[in-house]
Amino acid sequence: MSEKTENIIVYIPNKEGSLTEKNIYWIDKFQTIISIGLKQIVKSNFNLKLEFEDFAQKKNTDELIIIQMFLQNDLNTESVLNENSDHKTSVLINVYCDHEVEQSTSAGFSIKLYDEVTEKKVDLSEGINELKNDIWLKFLDISYKIKELLYHINKKPEEALQNIYVAQTSKDQNRNRKIIIRELEHLGYNVLPHKNFSSDLISYSDMVHENIKESVLSVHIFGNNYTPLNKNIEISGVELQNDIFIEVAEELVNQKKNIHRLVWIPPDLKPKSEKQKLYIESFKRNIELLRNTEIIQAPVEVFKNIIKNKIIILNSVKEEISISENKKANSVYIISSNENEKYLKEIEQEFSKNKISVLVIANSQDKIELLREHYHNLINCDGILIVYPNDNKQWLNSKLSDILKAPGFGRKKPFLFKTILHDSGNAPEFNIKINDLEVLYANGKSPNDLLKPIIEKFK
């Protein structure tokens, strides 16, 4: 970040003389608190300057960030800043202090600095140390947003923040959505969308489509309510965004790109309508909707960690794709539960004898590292051999599911073979359907005899 002093304007779109003494006191307290947040979070030189209505008439000012505060509803609409203003501002941060003055038409990032239950402006008359956590968090949200914007303004051309889309949800999950957004922004990711969601179907769909397409990960949250987009449209925003994700994922596949989706179902979820209950059940069952998708039902703190780990894995997968494109040696990925190490060793030796590299997962206590290695092998191997010596249907189904998802992880060519090798009198049971999946029964045969058909596929 640059060492220069950044100008940050606190703009009140009212005449200075029209404000009550109570409002003036509130503005002063706001500036004091936001200054503390900026010193903690931004950690660079900044100049916080207060401006009133006549600021809107100034031309070509150089301020980069403007915090536009809506205190009362007797506004001169011409003084409200928007995308068409003459100021060279990088962004507007709109702070709504009362629900009655909320301006849905104003562009920019928005935050509600009022109690959403009582719909009254938050009380800043108490000492700073007495402020409730929810109020502090809203001030920190503004500070982190400013930090992100300054990063974009001052970053070098080769630097880039990763975009993560966090979908709109029903009102009962808005608090959890904000918790997730706050966590991602604190970690340095660029959370989309930046603008408020429109109630117009076409505008809503276009914005969602554009934002998901620009992201590496799409996060969706199920709530208790099935909330239609508006009075004239029966489909909920949650359902529409999930449908749009499928469209975007298909477009990106055609462009040889990928996007992943995490769908969070809170553990205490209790759908309040039959329509929402049926939608969630249908979503879980429909395999077509679940491509490049993981459904997680866990506490929000656990889900935040899952998001972080997923991003790490996705970044690792990108590196593996370039390795895969330059790979020339033949290789087989052996997936096993490591129950019969002697038998596995004989299989590995047989492949090595025929100049076929063997990919396995090394023992490790680090789950993230295990997943990275698993995805690496799925992307880079020529063929897969699942050695299945026991009766563990759940384990087998999970491995077959990963094979099915391999193109989503970044694999660009078909497998030479996908084979299950078992040593049981009963054929293994599994629910996942995979084309060209072979099942071999060892039946006491030596690896030399057993693997000949597989080794022939490399010639």
Image: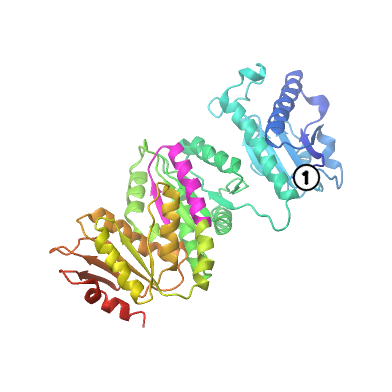
Task: Look at the image and say whether residue 240 sits in the magenta stretch.
Answer: no
Q: Is residue 391 above or below residue 53?
A: below
Q: Nearer the viewer, residue 107 or 76?
A: 107
Residue 210 appears in view: yes
Image spot of residue 128 (x, y percent): 66, 20
Q: Is residue 146 left or right of residue 3?
A: left
Residue 449: quadrant of the picture: bottom left
Farthest residue in the right direction?
59
Q: Secondary structure at mark 1?
A: loop
Residue shown at the point (24%, 67%) measured from the top left:
421
Quadrant position of the N terminus in the picture: top right
Q: Nearer the viewer, residue 435 or 392?
A: 392
Q: Is residue 385 left or right of residue 408?
A: left
Q: Is residue 115 left or right of residue 270?
A: right
The amino acid beneath tag 1 is Ser
Residue shown at the point (78%, 32%) measured from the top left:
14
Image spot of residue 277 (x, y percent): 34, 44
Q: Nearer the viewer, residue 88 or 412?
A: 412
Image spot of residue 62 (x, y percent): 84, 45
Residue 292 appears in view: no
Over which residues does the magenta segment extend?
293-315
Which residue carries the number 1 mark?
2
Task: Look at the image and say whether residue 300 sits in the magenta stretch.
Answer: yes
The colour scheme of the drawn protein is: rainbow
Residue shown at the point (26%, 74%) measured from the top left:
451
